[in-house]
Image: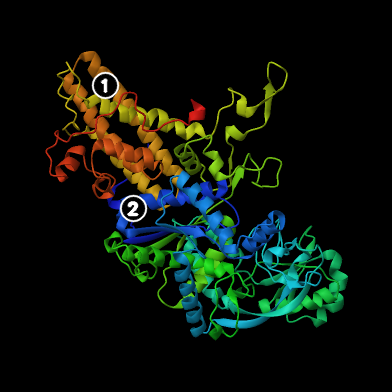
Amino acid sequence: MAHKLSKDCRPSWPHRAIVTAGMPYGNKNLHFGHVGGVFVPADFFARFLRDRLGKQNVIFVSGTDCYGSPIMEGHRKLRETCGTDCTLTDYVQANHDLQQSAIDGFEIELDLFGGSALPPAAPIHNQTTAEIIERLNERGVLHKRATKQFYDVRAGQFLNGRQVVGRCPIQGCKSEKAYADECDLGHQYEPEELIAPKSALTGETPELRPVDNIYFDLPAYLDFLKDYTRRLEANETVRPVVSKTMEEWLLPAQIYIQNKFREAFDAIEGQLPAHTVTEPEGNKSSFTVTFPSWEERDAAHEVLAAGGVRFRSGKALVPFRITGNIEWGVPVPDECGCSGLTCWVWPESLWAPISFTRTVLAEAERAGRADRYASLDWHDWWCSEDAHAYQFIGQDNIYFYGIAQTALWEALGCHMQQSTLVANYHVLYMGKKASSSSQTPPPPAAELLEHYTAEQLRAHFLSLGLGEKPVSFSPKAYDTRETGKNADGTPLLARDDKRVIDPVLKEGALLTGVFNRLARSCFYGVAEKEGDEASHRCGCIPAGTPDAGVIEASEQAVLAFEQAMHTFEFHHALTVCDGYLRAANKRWSDASKAAKNAEDDAAMKQALVNAFHELRVATVLMHGIVPVGCELICEHFAIDPDTFFSWDRIFDTCDELVASLGEKPGEHKVVPLPPRFDFFEKHPSQQ
């Protein structure tokens, strides 16, 4: 028997909330992983919080990450291949517009989808960057370091991060693409550690030349991060992938050397800084060298390289770079010790949600909508104990948001509240890692809408359970597996095979079938009908108290749904809705059939009282999952959406809700439903 939930044990929520979705780079449109793995879950949660806390207490922001070497490299290639004279700003604006269009297509409702280099956010983002860097400098946690940067002699220029390609030096990393100081799986390292570097401009092996930059003293926060990570492990709202990934970066500074280099290592070991050697256990092919800190480890690199000893570094905290010397970036104040530098893309993208929040509030004030949000002071959203930020990211970015951002927020010393990171695993495509260079490259997110409705896709993405493991997105419309032969002998592909079930439509069937039937039954059931004098045929929400079993089932569904949202188990929240809707639909079907057969008007009215109650509860719960259809149901209830979807009255009966509007139960008119009306439609291609 299922455990009964109690109203006395409901989770607590903040008074105000920030929701963010990881920023896509401004060099391309959104792919389905951006939408299904980040934006849809974030939108679901933001919509839920607006209903739960009041929309004036929630801000949902994201935007195009306009700076960084991927954008510069994409722009360079565009000009090289197309001869276009578009500027970098033009380039990111065009991609931002594509991203915005895809976001709109998937019914994602942000308070701002901005751009770090685009109005109206750009000037505020520049100001925020300057203020944060100046404060970090005042706090004594920024230091100038001369580090090496790749220089292409043949091209006669320094190379940005994406113009150098090699193999990742981090032990155990299987990344297929490693750049100057990070691989595509998010591992950080020093440029001199990159294995087999090549210039993307000329194909030559670039030189390493010293360059001054500003770094944040991340290793100084090792003990703080260890304690913080231990607390995360005990927090039920933090997914295990977050704390486990963070722990991997809090290890001693180590390098791993293959056993075949042992003789060469022994020859130069005396030249190394202080260290200890751990011999390989069992069949391990490498031994481990541990140093007191990253400084000794880095000093050992040159000695090892000169001695012909190849090595891989372990994950450990190293100074976090704040600046770069590329022109395309946010200017950094000269007071920090270096002149003419710009901010490296990663740190400024960490505080971009703050600048986007400030932009949202400034735009509301400028438009005379100061009442739109509970406070126009960004500190009340990011630095107040009664506020909280929820940041939706992919697993690759846990280092930046979990390690670097956590330490930066602590270093600022201005009561910055640490965020809850909602990290999802990768969305696979057709059972494999999604890759644009594979034989079956995944479609752009927007293209999926040519085959499925946004609500079908939203429900399916949320059902995948990406917080627990990588899961495949396998839309039948793109499935090119051969499943047989056509009549003419040509291969029959899965996408054309009527025997193959489309996994994307599993959740959609709940919408177009069960949810539609329950909603239609309610509104058609009370519709005025000429010649039918039944009491329930009054065009109003029928008055009456739902059966005790209906009230109990609804209460348990609400409590289970809220608990699932609290722990970010969105697939469980959807499962709660699925079970509740199917049970409500069956209850209506059985009761209405019995009442009709018995010609019992009172029984039919009671069946409608039950059904309307369950429909309203289901619509509130499903609102964040499939907002358009739910808001259409709300329109036919003829109740203001802010009142209808508010969790302040989630346990009320329809009588109590109607009474709160100042109306008499049984007299609240609904909007009549046209014949054969669907609140949730199939895609035209599925007809």
The residue that disc 2 covers is: 50
Count the numbered circles shown: 2
Q: What's the residue at 42%, 48% (across, down)?
A: 44
Q: Position of residue 67 (x, y in %)?
A: 58, 65
Report the coloring of the rendering. Answer: rainbow
The residue that disc 1 covers is: 592
Residue 13, by quadrant, is: bottom left
Q: Pointer 2: residues within 10 angstroms few (<14), some, or many (20+)?
A: many
Q: Is residue 659 visible?
A: yes
Between 580 and 535, the one nearer to me in the picture:
535
Q: Is residue 170 visible?
A: no
Q: Is residue 37 above or below residue 371?
A: above
Between 189 and 446, the one nearer to me in the picture:
446
Q: Position of residue 645 (x, y in %)?
A: 29, 45
Q: What's the residue at 67%, 47% (across, down)?
A: 436
Q: Pointer 1: residues within 10 angstroms few (<14), some, or many (20+)?
A: many
Q: What's the residue at 22%, 25% (across, down)?
A: 527
Q: Quadrant of the N terminus?
A: top left
Dot 2 amino acid type: Arg
Q: Earlier in the sequence, mark 2 or mark 1?
A: 2
Dot 1 amino acid type: Ser
Label 2, secondary structure: give it.
Answer: helix
Q: CA distance from mark 2 to mark 1?
A: 35 Å
Q: Is residue 533 above or below residue 558?
A: above
Q: Position of residue 550 (x, y in %)?
A: 26, 34
Contact? badges 2 and 1 (CB < 8 Å): no
